Image (cartoon, rainbow, N blue to C red):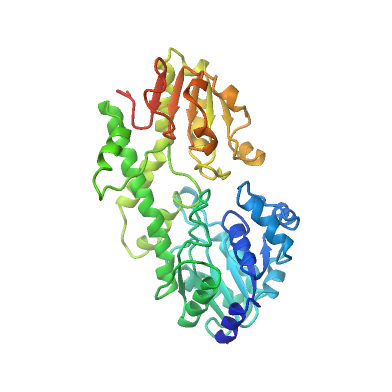
């Protein structure tokens, strides 16, 4: 049966269903349609389905804004809300729904709902792939029994199941889904082989087949948690630099002269759907076996502390400029969680802004990349870049390309906080200029 499936994949006769058409699912749908597969984009969101069926990207991204209309015009991409109906029409089902970790507790409820709907329409000979981030063992102990129970089919015999962790880096057009190596692992050997064949048919990079799904699941968590730990380290060094009156930017430049120094920048915090959540999935798996990681969770707490630390920097800059925060207007430039994306999930801005309001500041926001709906999730008072640059304090949180075009002479604010490392410390002579990692003597 697996050879029949692999033949369908090779000949592009396999119909691919993407369940969850968000920041991961939509690029995947475009990828498979671009490579010649007929793709069904299944999502419970009426808005996403309607826009996709009009050939319009619901994500404000320069690549997707062009590629979604292009693949839609080929007739190989359609969308529907009925996940079960979509599964009935498909040979491959890829699940890419969110897996949050509210208050540090991993949540697979979206995966559970998606799998239940898929199972009710699952055909014999189908391949199910989970791309959503999950804890090690989730496909084997959670997804597999659920699919078998709801479908009445047997995994490894009637259908196949594998994990291929998504590696999408939103806003990074160089490392896109077409050229990024992928890791795949099946709950059994046949499932792994089928998944490897699928990704080899669309990805122009190495496909790493690991021994099982558990290994593939943990690999994603290790990748992202390593980055979280590295960011936490440089964030802590940044605070050390603030206390000692040393510029962290100069420290990074000096250390980077050594070949094995890992270069990264401090920030106002770590946001997005992956990095803030993934460590808790490692924690869940390890705690179940009686081991309690300390480094990983210390790093997570440190990164979580940076938005409030940035709020302190803002208040400190205002004081230095002769202003009281309770009588000041603070303009936030960039509310997305990172540069050149419209995603505001767990963005540092969503902690910093309420804190500034609590301290009495009037806050205005500006972000040319974030759509109106996402802006409303962050704050109601939106302003233009020109007006923002004239606030009492302007705060650059995100290094959007549009912000890199701003000349220091355009900044009229007397207080500037540069958490995005866009400017040099000498650009604002006569102003109160603070950067994460550069502030003499925070009290």
Q: Is residue 317 left or right of residue 384?
A: left
- With respect to residue 91, does 342 lie above or below? above
Q: Position of residue 257 (x, y in %)?
A: 25, 43
User: Does any portion of residue 213 appear in the rendered image?
Assistant: yes
- With respect to residue 339, does 425 lie above or below? above
Q: Quadrant of residue 81?
A: bottom right
User: Does any portion of residue 361 appear in the rendered image?
Assistant: no
Q: What is the quadrant of the N terminus in the image?
A: bottom right
Residue closer to the observer: 71 or 416: 71
Q: What is the quadrant of the C terminus in the image?
A: top left
Say which residue appears at 43% left-offset and 36% top-offset.
268
Number of dots carrying numbers: 0
Say which residue appears at 31% left-offset and 43% top-offset.
233
Q: Is residue 341 left or right of residue 256?
A: right
Q: Position of residue 164 (x, y in %)?
A: 49, 67
Q: Is residue 116 left or right of residue 168?
A: right
Say which residue appears at 57% left-offset and 73% top-offset.
128
Say which residue appears at 63% left-offset and 37% top-offset.
376
Q: Position of residue 87 (x, y in %)?
A: 67, 72
Q: Position of residue 27 (x, y in %)?
A: 59, 58
């Amino acid at each position: 049966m697996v050879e029949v499936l692999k033949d369908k994949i090779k000949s592009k006769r396999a119909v691919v269903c993407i369940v969850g058409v968000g920041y991961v699912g939509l690029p995947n749908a475009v990828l498979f349609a671009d490579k010649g597969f007929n793709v069904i984009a299944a999502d419970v969101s009426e808005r996403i389905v309607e826009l996709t069926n009009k050939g319009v990207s619901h994500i404000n991204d320069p690549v997707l804004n062009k590629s979604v209309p292009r693949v839609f015009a080929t007739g190989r991409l359609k969308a529907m809300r009925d996940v079960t109906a979509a599964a009935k029409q498909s040979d491959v089902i890829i699940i890419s729904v969110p897996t949050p970790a509210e208050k540090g507790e991993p949540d697979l409820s979206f995966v559970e709902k998606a799998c239940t709907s898929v199972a009710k329409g699952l055909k014999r000979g189908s391949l199910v792939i989970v791309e959503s981030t999950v804890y090690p063992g989730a496909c084997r102990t959670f997804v597999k029994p659920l699919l078998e129970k709801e479908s009445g089919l047997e995994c490894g015999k009637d259908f196949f199941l594998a994990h291929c962790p998504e590696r999408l880096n939103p806003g990074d057009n160089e490392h896109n889904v077409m050229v990024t190596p992928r890791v795949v692992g099946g709950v059994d050997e046949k499932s792994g082989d089928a998944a490897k064949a699928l990704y080899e048919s669309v990805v122009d990079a190495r496909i790493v087949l690991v021994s099982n799904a558990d290994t593939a699941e943990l690999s994603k968590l290790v990748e992202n948690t390593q980055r979280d730990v590295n960011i936490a380290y440089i964030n802590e060094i940044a605070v050390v630099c603030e206390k000692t009156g040393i510029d962290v930017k100069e420290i990074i430049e000096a250390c980077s002269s050594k070949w094995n120094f890992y270069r990264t920048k401090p920030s106002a915090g770590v946001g997005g759907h992956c990095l803030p959540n993934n460590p808790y999935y490692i924690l869940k798996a390890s705690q179940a076996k009686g081991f309690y990681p300390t480094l990983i969770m210390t790093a997570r707490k440190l990164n979580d502390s940076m938005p409030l630390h940035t709020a302190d920097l803002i208040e400190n800059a205002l004081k230095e400029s002769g202003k009281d925060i309770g009588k000041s207007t603070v303009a936030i430039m960039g509310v997305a969680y990172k540069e050149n994306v419209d995603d505001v999930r767990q963005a540092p801005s969503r902690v910093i802004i309420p804190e500034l309001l609590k301290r009495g500041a009037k806050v205005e926001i500006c972000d040319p990349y974030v759509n109106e709906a996402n802006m409303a999730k962050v704050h109601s008072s939106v302003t233009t870049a020109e007006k923002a640059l004239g606030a009492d304090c302007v705060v650059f949180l995100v290094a959007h390309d549009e912000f890199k075009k701003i000349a220091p002479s355009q900044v009229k604010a007397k207080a500037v906080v540069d958490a995005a490392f866009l400017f040099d410390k000498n650009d604002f002579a006569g102003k109160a200029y603070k950067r994460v990692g550069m502030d003499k003597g925070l009290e």
